[in-house]
Amino acid sequence: MINVYEKLLLENKAWAKEQVQIDPEFFSRLSHIQSPEFLWIGCSDSRVPADKITGTQPGEIFVHRNIANMVVHTDINLLSVLEYAVEVLKVKHIIVCGHYGCGGVKAAMGNQSLGIINKWLRSIKDVYRIHRDEIDKIENEEDRTNRLIEYNVMEQVMNLAKTSIIQRAWKNNQRPHLHGWVYGLNDGIIKPVYEMEPGTHIDHLYEYDNL
């Protein structure tokens, strides 16, 4: 009897064989160069794989995922990915993609203590606090959560614009374009909810003068 993890290895071999049959130079080409145009900051949810839902191939999207697709200014992991994508890979677009029905956002709207994840969800609670008057007027619980999911994506795009990494790239290279999207688990459709073109001015409090 094949173990679950062994099935993954078998599927991998079958996939690799198929790729070579379709394109004999596929792996040789990938192993020598990486030049994606997109950085994808998405949720860790297993139902939202960046390549599958966008129909892209290996090498086309540089990916970072965490719970609820957050851009936190103290997250060295995220900032390292961002800096590499912008300054080395020179991506033209950065996409923050959330998804409707996100468990992380839903948890942030409640008061249950969840251990260490409380610290991560605090940033989402802050977004909720800012928009609480509007969100709490929505009668349906699912709709309330989904509205906060949209606002959270918008806030994370804004958090990108607040970084010196993005502001430097905007000033010197007129890129990248920032996008906020939300993926629908029920229909598989991505909904654009926010975008910022290179050079967009934000509150001067967050803009750096000496870049």
Image: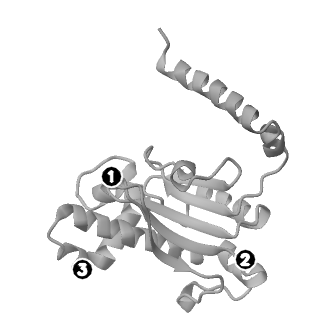
Residue 207 in the image: state x and y as whole percent.
Answer: 61, 86
Per the image, the residue denoted by label 2 is 169
Q: Amino acid at mark 2?
A: Ala
| Residue 162 visible to the viewer | no
Tell me the tag on residue 182: none
Q: CA distance from mark 1 to mark 2?
A: 33 Å
Residue 143 seen in the figure: yes
Q: Residues within 10 Å of mark 2 (few under 14, many from 20)?
A: some
Q: Residues within 10 Å of mark 1 (few under 14, many from 20)?
A: some
Place of residue 106 in the rendered image (x, y in percent of width and height, measured from the top left): 29, 57
Residue at numbered disc 1: 103
- Tell me the distance, in whole angstroms, between the alpha carbons under discs 2 and 3: 35 Å
Disc with the residue nearer the chain's start (3 vs 1): 1
Residue sitting farthest toward the front: 22
Which color scheme is applied? one colour
Give 46 or 113, whichever is nearer the viewer.
46
Left/right placement of residue 204 relative to residue 175 reads: left
Which quarter of the figure has residue 126?
bottom left
Q: Secondary structure at mark 2?
A: helix
Hey, which quadrant is residue 152 in on the image? bottom left
The kind of residue on which mark 3 rests is Glu
Residue sitting at the far top: 1
In what element is the residue under mark 3? helix
Q: Position of residue 132 (x, y in %)?
A: 25, 76
Residue that extends furthest to the left in the rendered view of this protein: 139
Q: Earlier in the sequence, mark 2 or mark 3?
A: 3
